[in-house]
Amino acid sequence: MDKESLRAYLNTTLVEVPEAWAGQFTLRRGKIRDIIDLGQALIITTTDRISAFDRVLTTVPCKGQILNELSLFWFGETDDIVPNHILQKISGRSVLTAKCEVLPVEFVVRGYLTGSAWRAYQKGEAISGIRLKSGLKMNQRFPEPLVTPSTKASQGQHDEPISLKEIVAHGLLEEPLLDQIVHLALALFKRGTQIAKAQGLILVDTKYEFGLLAGKPILIDEIHTPDSSRFWYLESYDELFKRGEKQRELDKEYLRQWLMSHNFMGDGEPPVIPDEVRLETALRYLSAYEKITGQAFSPLSPDLAEEQRLITTTIQNYLKHTT
């Protein structure tokens, strides 16, 4: 599927799940995902909304399906490390998941000095309490991956870096659980790095979200997608790093860079994003899916009636088994 094929989906993006789909249940909206709360389970639909700098900005064709199916791929590749919240795939966009106690911290693992970490380093700032040595270069690989947590911001607000010590000191997590989560995050990053390398990619950095189910950690939200992760092409990394040039990217950093070139980094009124930028961003998501999974992407029908039918059937089946 190429850019011109994606163009046909520009005007059929899923902006949000209609209230009517939720029936008698509560519908909550995150930055990207709309969630129908069934009590002990959740129906999570990944919309085509896209955010950058913690602001929801526009929609990107086929993005929701790509993110959902890519997360399902990665959940399957990592469930031997930690269980995840998936109970059932409903459609390309939607899943039925277990409801759990969501931990109040996101765990960002960084393998390279880039992005917001590089910007902080240039200012002489610590990164989630970690003070790096001087003399490092942009996009330089760390000897060992760094865990740099952040607080979870509400929509329209910025995530804030927080150190591991501060997480404990502020009572967000107790130290034994924190140590366990850090161990799991590093193990997931190692697995992701291995699979990405086999596909000619570098998993540069990523974030993980965890919850507790019956007192035990489970992986939730998404994993190793272009929304939560940064990917570079392996074959060109060394040469581009030596020359101090920008890496070839396979993620939504393209959109972040476009926004920054238009003087937007989260504050104030965002610029209007042209269709060509939306399409180029969609192509990055599509390329990431096909490059990582080795499978051709097959888009869903733009008619959302089937999505509503599948969600309604899932709710009906849920009610049969819980009442």
Image (tube, rainbow, N blue to C red):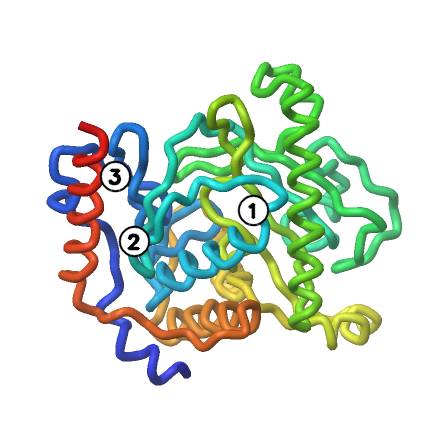
- In front: mark 2 or mark 3? 2
Q: Nearer the viewer, residue 86 or 178?
A: 86
- Compared to residue 43, the image places residue 270 above or below, namely below
Taking the image as shown, residue 51 lies to the left or right of residue 109, namely left
- Left of 206 or right of it: where is 37? left
Q: In terms of sequence position, does the residue under pointer 2 or pointer 3 come before the other?
A: 3
Mark 1 surroundings within 10 Å by alpha-carbon count, few (fewer than 14), some (14 through 19), many (20 or more): few
| Three-letter code, disc 1 | Asp
**In the visual, does 43 lie left or right of 98?**
left
Image x and y of residue 288, in percent: 53, 69
Any mark on residue 90, and which? 2
Badge 3 marks a residue whose secondary structure is strand
Q: Are marks 1 and 3 in contact (CB under 8 Å)?
A: no
Which residue has dot 3 on it? 36
Q: Would you place residue 304 above or below residue 116 in this image?
A: below
The mark found on residue 62 in the picture is none
Q: CA distance from mark 2 to mark 1?
A: 19 Å
Label 2 vs 1, first from the N-terminus:
1
